[in-house]
Image (cartoon, coloured by chain):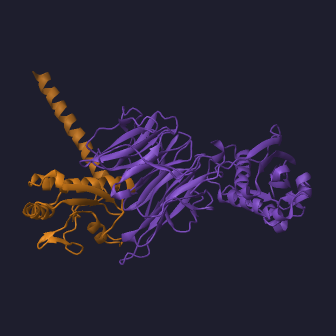
Amino acid sequence: MLLNKLNKIILALTVTLFLGACATQQKATTPTPTDDAYTGTETVKYLADGVPDRVFFATNKSDLTSAASATLAKQAAYLKANPNLNVVLEGHADERGTREYNLALGERRATAAKNYLISNGIAANRIKVISYGKEKPANPASNALAWSQNRRAVTVKTN
Amino acid sequence: MKYKILKIIFIFFLLTQKTFALVSVDITRGNLDPLPIAISNFYLDTTITENIKKLSIENKIPELIQNNLTRSGLFFALEKKSFIQKPDIAHNRPRFEDWAFIKAQVLVTGKISLEKEGRLKVEFKLWDIVSATELSALAFYTSPDNWRRVSHLISDKIYERLTGEKGYFDSRIIYVAETGPKVDRKKRLAVMDQDGYGVKYLTLGNELVLTPRFSPTSQFVTYMSYYKNLPRVYLLNIETGIQDLVGDFPGMTFAPRFSPDGKKIIMSFAQDGNSDIYTMDIKTRIVEKLTDHPSIDTSPSYSPDGLQIAFNSDRSGFQQIYIMKSDGSNVKRISFGEGLYGTPVWSPRGDLIAFTKLYKNKFYIGVMRSDGSGERLLTENYYQEAPSWAPNGRVLIFYRETPSDVTGKGGGAKLWSIDLTGYNERLILTETDASDPSWSGLLSAK
């Protein structure tokens, strides 16, 4: 009985230590903030009145911010209202990463946006995805603002 | 577009390997004390015709050898003005005390003559001034317009004799030539000699091209192209200009490299937000999937024995370097330092992996052993990535970008090389901006 309890304590301790180690590891390898997604409208174009064409991402991230989800919801509504319209989602990264990883990251960002549209009732066959990695910046400057504007997925009409 | 196969025959007509060289160059440390070398002009013997005399290759060949050797950082070339002996007399047998007087430790001399059928014979001798002996002597036969290639071969022989390691001068670099504004950059494949001469553009710039890599065994190059706006990996024969799509993937393929035997292409395939690593056998077209993980797995590079693969993955949450067996088993993370790690490239010697590191908003080119130990950062800058090894594993080439101003101007990309020691960082001059360099193997080894 006592032995059992001891075992449990040891196990709990081990788990704590392990998680503790993980936490330090995470901390040590987090070089960039995760809340640096662009929120302005400077580079944004519009698919239609009130329907922004792009969403922005935090550094190295591809999950959708609440602002991104709101934009994509508008795009979904617009695509529903225009059932003959097809789009390509262009995924992009900022210039502060290696070229090949950025190609993959752009694809992941565009896919995140595509999946949101699909979950909002848009048929998958209406949406294509292409990644340009860091090859086509929207803002060519080398500063934090430009990089935040370049971490994006842009919805482009194909017909 | 079409590449001449450069055929050069060489023979050893006199080899004094038994002589113990007193001079030698230690290339395992940063060489802050380069070896003083005197490279005499070559001399033309009486068989040389007027039209060949016009080429002044008796000066150009030694000059090119001198450029190669001094760029390696291991040699210090003495001023020709200080040379006392004439090229022909020195080539026969130098007066060693004359050369010792100007502090030369080694001397290169040479002779050029014309053989039947217009073949050029270029012979050189390497002399050890300290021990007053001939170290090596070789003759190369070639056509007169091929003098650059001969100069590179001679440079390699000298490097090899004095360092005990293979040279890397008889090699080429493929890269992406960049022009135009940053928001609409035009990119073309280009290939040049390792010293930056003889650039040839292989694509017209109509579509975006990225990450060309040489086959270690042939004149094939693999690269990524946005031809018809479909980002895919291609295979290009730079002799014929014929290119082929690699595989039949329903999405983006990227980050290609050859296997060491040149038979397979390893690359990433991205689908549904996930990038995994695949190989395709060039002949059989059989495709194999090596990683199966919901993270981004990319930038694969084989070990020179073909048994292992290094790649980068963000499966830990952040981009890090992993190795696995070539069948995809035994995946093991090897980078544990602070920051992000990418673009692992296995050294042709097999002992080291070069990489790009991003830490505190700076980019580094570094090396580590294949078990992740012994990490050494060679150079720090605003942005640089994509190291590629010289065929002897002693020098790395990479590209570096400078930041642009708020209007997007001022930024650019250039090719740089650095020794494994972290010394001897050099800009490689290119006509245009340049990125994604890949070093070929030794051309003479093919």
In the displayed structure, B56 sits above or below B93; it is: below
Q: Nearer the viewer, residue B254 or B417?
A: B254
Q: Is residue B270 above or below residue B102?
A: above
Task: Write the residue at 36% across / 78% down.
Answer: B407
Viewer-nearest residue: B360 or A133: A133
Relative side of A115 to B364, left or right? left
What colour has chain B?
purple
For this view, does B236 lie left or right of residue B227? right
Of A49 and A133, nearer the camera is A49
Which residue appears at 11% of the width and 62% of the height?
A79
> What residue is at 14 percent from the left and 55 percent from the top?
A116
Specify the colour of chain A: orange
The quarter of the image holding the N terminus of chain B is: bottom right
Left or right position of B208 against B71: left
Residue A24 percent coordinates (x, y): 27, 48
Viewer-side residue, B238 vs B133? B238
Report if residue A60 is visible in the image: no
Quarter of the image with the C terminus of chain B is: top right
**Residue B111: image location, x then y, percent:** 85, 55
Picture coordinates of residue B18, whole percent (x, y): 82, 37
Q: Position of residue B291 (x, y in %)?
A: 33, 38
**Residue located at (29% from left, 46% from top):** B250
Residue B194 to residue B406: above or below:
above
